[in-house]
Amino acid sequence: KKGLLLLTGNVGTGKTAVINTFLKSIDEEVVAVMIPDPGLNSSDLYNILSNEFKMDRKFSSKEDFLNHLKPFLNEINLKRKKILLIIDEAQSMSHELLREIRQLSNSGAANKKLINIFMVAQNEFIAILDENRNRAFKRNIGTIFHLDPLNDLETEEYITHRLKVAGSDKRIFSSKAIRDIHVFSAGIPRLINIACDRALLTAFGLSQRKISGSV
């Protein structure tokens, strides 16, 4: 019930994994809608929301949409349900769409947000929000969290966890190999995955059961 929320992180840090895990964990009281590509104009946004919210109507103007949205949100609220709109790749939003999202987030009474908007973006979105024209939007964001890359200890724990999930309880990667993987990946999980996958294939090709720094 914070209205606007923002999660940022570099490419490959696991933002989409966080969203997917989150969507699996929410209860039936939450009506969740996800927009994976926000390169939309305003009318596209209204009609996507209308379709996802099952409002059974196509809108040709902003005023028409907002006039129907408020009673819809009030009805959902009376049913003790919550509306959650998730926008992935939010750094792709135009300034005009940001303005529309801000207006959507203000739907409801002054002390009660009827729609929660969870934006997920790459780091450059912060610079976009710092532009003078977007300062008011940034002030409306209730929570901002940055997903950092993994440090060296977390990298080792992550590799150990992934191996355990795959069915291995042995220490396959040497300490030197893990350090090299952390340096190569800079702690980005996607790059850790790639490095480990190639290392496992290489070790298999060499008939080695341990992955050393040389591998």
Image (cartoon, grey):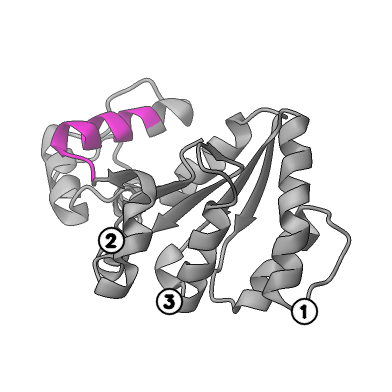
- Please give left or right for residue 180 compared with residue 7 in the image: left
Between tags 1 and 2, which lies in front? 1
Residue shown at 71% from the left, 46% from the top: 73
Q: Amino acid at mark 1?
A: Ser
Residue 172 picture location, percent across and down: 28, 31
- Please give left or right for residue 199 compared with residue 69 in the image: left
Residue shown at 37% from the left, 49% from the top: 141
* 25 in relation to 44, above or below: above
Q: Amino acid at mark 2?
A: Asn
* Image quadrant where residue 75 sits: top right
* 165 in relation to 116, above or below: above
Q: Amino acid at mark 3?
A: His
Q: Magenta segment range?
A: 149-161
Front residue of 132 and 22: 132
Instruction: Look at mark 1 in the image and give the residue it sits on.
Output: 60
Residue shown at 62% from the left, 34% from the top: 24
Counting residues from the start of the chain, the first of labels 3 and 2 encountered is 3
Instruction: Report if residue 157 lies within the magenta region.
Output: yes
What is the spatial separation of the Cα atoms under label 1 and label 2, in whole angstroms?
A: 34 Å
Counting residues from the start of the chain, the first of labels 1 and 2 encountered is 1
Secondary element under disc 1, as helix, strand or loop, is loop
